[in-house]
Amino acid sequence: MVSLAPWGPAARLEELPLLKRGAEAEIRLGEFMGLQAVYKARVRKPYMHPRLAERLVRLRTRREARVIAAARAAGVSAPALLAVFPSLGLIVMEYVEGPLLKDVIDRRGLGAGGLVEEAGYNLGLLHRAGVVHGDPTTSNYIVRGGGVVLIDYGLAEFSSSVEDRAVDLHLFRRAVESTHAPLAGELYSLYTRGYLRAVGEWGGEVLRRAEEIRLRGRYVRERRRSVWGVG
């Protein structure tokens, strides 16, 4: 159990309101030094040897904190880091209030196009900093004011690989194909427009690789249907 008495009204982390529980972490809402904050606590895998689990939690917590710091230094609209406790697997961040980009698109359709382009621009800034996000879906952008904030860096890592960058774009396209199918093509075009505005000349290579990834996935699905009748 983690005592929070020096930093907020709750005595223990477990007493803070739970915002989200995932396979890798729990997200809770609290205060830190008088500010509303998000507490992200990594979950230790019960099937792992305790020493290995502790080591992985420390490493991943440090990595995520470094990624967020690098993102903000590069101009990405990301939550501010307030505190990091690697031994506890705990990151304390600014609480970003606002609707998900996904929900704004649900309501406004292409009227949210400027926000989608801004989302792509932020991913481009992240890639320019040598970081890939790992899950840049419309559920990981929060709309605040006239812009967006890119959140959840739990799967992010340092990489300048064209393939890794292209996978980020592919994941965004797959997400909008799933959640906003009739608008998916236009949303992806807006997203990549913002992306290219951030990355410049080498962005074309990333877009071409993303298209290759899409075609590879389509080929695999078609083969599965033809051979197994599934897909």
Image (spheres, helix red, strand yellow):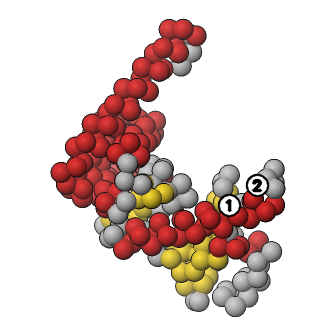
Could you classify mark 2 by the number of other residues whose Cα lies within 10 Å: few (under 14), some (14-19), or many (20 or more)?
A: some
x and y percent of residue 121 in the render?
29, 57
- Label disc, if present, on residue 65 of the rendered structure: none
x and y percent of residue 88 in the render?
71, 73
How many numbered dots are placed on residues in this image?
A: 2
Q: Quadrant of the N terminus?
A: bottom right
- Disc 2 is placed on an element classified as loop
- Is 226 situated above or below 197? above
x and y percent of residue 85 in the render?
64, 77
Residue name at image x 36 percent, y 74 percent: 73
The residue lying toward the viewer, choosing from 60 and 112, is 60
Quadrant in the picture for residue 10: bottom right
- Disc 1 is placed on an element classified as helix
Q: Nearer the viewer, mark 1 or mark 2?
A: 1
- Residue hosting label 2: 45
**Residue farthest left in this picture:** 201
Residue name at image x 70 percent, y 91 percent: 6
- Is 141 situated above or below 8? above
Kind of residue at disc 2? Lys
- Among numbered discs 1 and 2, the one appearing first in the sequence: 2
Kind of residue at disc 1? Leu
CB atoms of marks 1 and 2 within 8 Å: yes
Residue name at image x 34 percent, y 50 percent: 108
User: Does residue 206 appear anywhere in the picture?
Assistant: yes
The residue lying toward the viewer, choosing from 56 and 25, is 56
Residue name at image x 29 percent, y 43 percent: 206
x and y percent of residue 4 in the render?
72, 83
User: Does residue 119 appear anywhere in the picture?
Assistant: no
- Residue hosting label 1: 56
Please indicate whether residue 4 sits to the left or right of residue 37 in the image. Answer: right
Please indicate whether residue 206 sits to the left or right of residue 178 in the image. Answer: left
